[in-house]
Image: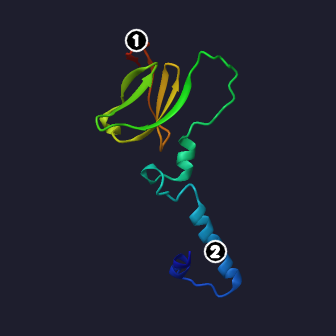
Amino acid sequence: MKNWLRAQPHQPATLADLQALVDRFCDAYNNNHHRPHRSLPHRATPAAVYAATPKALPDSSRDADTHARVRHDRIDPSGVVTLRVNGRLHHLGIGRTHARTHVILLVDDLHVRIVNAITGELLRELILDPRGFPMS
């Protein structure tokens, strides 16, 4: 903060001017929509990561036969992400253009959605065949 204040071209002459400058600093520093965060994948903004994260919603059905989960992963260099369902590994092709992209897998029984963790873009949606083959 001190370095930022010193670097400003117009230095404050009164306490009111200083308070206005400190308020500008707080707004710029805490703005979740513009300032990237180094601990987030690809230095995304906190607002982008929050928007891409699936939100918990009330479920009207409490059916014990369903299995829903959220998994965070990264697409491998060949454009594939691996998912285990019912004890079987499924290698789901996304495309080499998305290699090393951080993704969120939304799995609801055999229905799978693969979403870009940064932008929230739906990369692929499919229903897995219980025999082990993906069906688009």
Determine which residue is flagged by label 2: 22
Residue 48 vs 122, above or below: the answer is below
Mark sitting earlier along the chain (1/2): 2
Residue 27 vs 89, above or below: the answer is below
Label 2 Cα neighbours within 10 Å, binned few <14 / some 14-19 / many ≥20: some
Tags 1 and 2 in contact by the CB under 8 Å rule?
A: no
Which residue is painted at 59% across and 60% down in the image? 31
Give the Cα distance between marks 1 and 2.
Answer: 62 Å
Q: Which residue is situated farthest in the left direction here?
A: 78
x and y, in percent, of residue 11 in the image: 58, 84
Label 1 Cα neighbours within 10 Å, binned few <14 / some 14-19 / many ≥20: few
Which numbered disc covers residue 19?
Answer: none
Callout 2, which amino acid? Val
Which residue is painted at 37% across and 37% down in the image? 75
Q: Which residue is situated farthest in the bottom direction here?
A: 13
- State the residue in front, 11 or 131: 131
Which residue is painted at 53% across and 41% down in the image? 52
x and y, in percent, of residue 87 in the image: 43, 20
Residue 114 vs 8, above or below: the answer is above
Disc 1 is placed on an element classified as: loop
Residue 114 vs 50, above or below: the answer is above
Determine which residue is flagged by label 1: 131
The N terminus lies in quadrant: bottom right
The C terminus lies in quadrant: top left
Q: Splitting the image into 4 quarters, where does residue 100 fall?
A: top left
Which residue is painted at 70% across and 83% down in the image? 15
Callout 1, which amino acid? Arg
